Amino acid sequence: MSELHVNLVAVDRKIWSGSASMVVAKTLEGEIGILPRHEPVLALLANSPVRITTTDGKVIQAAVHGGFFAVDSDNVSILAETAELSGEIDVDRARAALERAKAAGADTPDEVAAIERAEVRLKVALADQSKDHAARSATG
Amino acid sequence: MGAQLRVYRRRIKSVQATKKITKAMELIASSRIVKAQQRVEAAQPYTRELIRAISAAASHTGGGHPLTDTDQRLRQRAAVLVVSADRGLAGAYSSAAIKEGEQLSSLLAEQGLEVVPFLVGRKAAAYYRFRGRKVAAEWTGFTDQPTYAHAKEIAAALLEAFLLRTEEGGVDEIHIVYTHFESMVTQRPTVRRILPIQVVEQTAEEAAASGQGPFPLYEFEPSAGAVLDSLLPKYVENMVFAALLLSAASEHAARRRAMKSATDNAEELIKSLTRQANQARQAEITQEISEIVGGADALSASA
């Protein structure tokens, strides 16, 4: 079976690249799942988690802000202004950031976007943690 | 110790202290060039993908976007973003960039355009302030380590000016003057027009010749126009970011070179001062001996 070649790139660094069997992301119009041999797509991403299922079955989550992605003959490029893998996010700090953003209010579009970003980061960080926890309880 | 010898010794000490400082600055700059170069390279993949996506989206919408239209606007005003350094001691780095900006400004003025300066770095800001010129905006304090947030801030100001109608004081073109980092030894002040963007439309044969192949028939979400709308500001941000990164690398390289020659000069100076000090010391000793001999002679003659 063919596989996807994924490049997850932020403005200042390459975050992750490798082969995957599925990529799930949320565009401005809703969630979209990309499997091998998908038609070419160029879509704007909402502030949301991106899930990449690698060929060996692992799931990689990343919080992506202000990005877009292009699919073209099994090459998937996800470009983001900032992107963080779930493992890079500190849960406590993400939670604190969310509270700070909420405390600042939601009056301007910027502030709303800040809250949204903080929520996405926390969601990604928590998803990773619960997965770790599940893995640990399964083995232990 | 004679007065002259003391003066020489004092000067040697002071030059040695200066040499230590310039040597340290040279080492710091060398280590930062490598980091700055790595940042330039790390930003490449994004730029490549972004330009590809924009080209694809632009060829689908068939022009007509306000950021790509070259013909429909009057050419009345042009913004010039000059990237210089915050600190001196970098040789001709800042002045070369500022001079390039001056040349561009006079060229644009010849074409009948009004130039609106935007400045990055304390050196350019000081240059314009000293001449009492009006500046649209200036940013300082980050030229040695620019981040994307800085580029975003600058791009936002540039875009705001660009999107304003000409009659209301908006600009019709945006040029950027930065120092291109070609290698450790060559950095060149460079001018680039970032807006309006020139979209190069390729035919299938041309695309095949360049080895990229034609753009696939993308499905755009939400629409090609909307994708282009949100990509073009990112393009401007990215161009500003790339210019800032390259300039930062150039700044470090220029500083390293300036500090290396300062260190070499200090060494040279210490060498010649040491020679002079030795000569003064020997002259002093010779004088003392001749004084003693002369004194002994005088004593034996009188006895």
Image: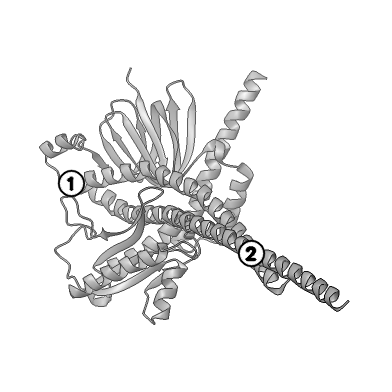
Which secondary structure lies at badge 2? helix
Instruction: Give the residue at mark 1.
Output: B59
Give the answer, above or below, for where A48 lies relative to B195. above
**Residue B220: x, y in percent?**
25, 42
Q: Closer to the camera, B119 or B179?
A: B179
Rendered residue at 59%/54% (across/down): B24
User: Do callouts 2 and 1 mark residues in contact (Cβ within 8 Å)?
Assistant: no
> Secondary structure beneath disc 1?
helix
Mark 2 Cα shell of 10 Å, populated few (<14), some (14-19), many (≥20) = few
Alpha carbon separation for disc pair 2 and 1: 78 Å
Q: Which residue extends farthest right? A: B303
B102 shown above or below B264: below
The mark nearer the N terminus, 2 or 1, is 1
**Is disc 1 surrounded by few (<14), some (14 to 19) or many (20+) residues within 10 Å?**
some
Q: Which residue is mark 2?
A: B279
Disc number for residue B37: none
Which residue occupies the extreme top position in the image? A1
Residue B136, percent from left and from top: 37, 74
Q: Amino acid at mark 2?
A: Gln
* Residue B8 location, quadrant: bottom right
Q: Position of residue B238 (x, y in %)?
A: 36, 52
Q: Nearer the viewer, residue B22 or B191?
A: B22
Outermost residue on the bottom side: it is B132
In the rendered image, the quadrant that contains the N terminus of chain B is bottom right
> Is residue B164 at all visible to an observer of this figure?
no
Q: Chain of mark 1?
A: B
Nearer to us in this view, A106 or A140? A140
Q: Which amino acid type is shown beneath numbered disc 1?
A: Ser
Q: Would residue B4 appear left or right of A55 to someone viewing this image?
A: right
In the rendered view, tell whether residue B58 sits above or below residue B285: above
